[in-house]
Image: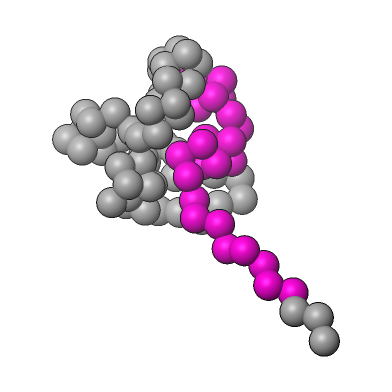
Amino acid sequence: MTHDARKVETPTLRGLIHDCGGPTAVARELGCSPQWVHSMIQRGHLPYSELKEKKRAEVLAGMQKTGNLTANQIRRIGFGI
């Protein structure tokens, strides 16, 4: 008897950005540099200004190709809450 247990992966900011077309596509949509997006990935969280402005998560939610995360879910991933 074989058991096919598939591991359910928790969404990450890196995976989300990859699903949105990568750092270059995200940078183009957000109006910033790809280096800034890479630093956001390395830090592992969205900029803290997102808590107040709430714009970046909306853009990322609209850019997803395969994901169906809402902007609020993206904020939770982006801040680890």
Tell me the residue at 82%/87% (across/down). 1
Query: Is residue 28 positioned above or below 22 on the image?
Result: above
Tell me the residue at 51%/41% (across/down). 16
* Span highlighted in magenta in the image: 4-28
Tell me the residue at 55%/52% (across/down). 67
55 in magenta: no
Dividing the picture into quarters, in which one does residue 52 lie? top left
Dividing the picture into quarters, in which one does residue 33 lie? top left
Which percent across, then down, holds residue 71?
36, 48
Toward the front, the furthest residue is 1
Is 48 situated left or right of 13 in this image?
Answer: left
Query: Is residue 37 positioned above or below 63 on the image?
Result: above
Can residue 71 be seen here? The reply is no
Tell me the residue at 61%/45% (across/down). 65
Query: Is residue 67 positioned above or below 4 on the image?
Result: above
Toward the bottom, the furthest residue is 1
Dividing the picture into quarters, in which one does residue 54 lie? top left
Which percent across, then down, holds residue 32?
41, 15
Which percent across, then down, holds residue 40?
40, 26
Which percent across, then down, holds residue 72?
32, 51
Toward the right, the furthest residue is 1
Query: Is residue 61 positioned above or below 40 on the image?
Result: below
Depth check, front residue: 77 or 67:
77
Q: How many marks?
A: 0
Can residue 5 be seen here? The reply is yes
17 in magenta: yes
Model colouring: one colour
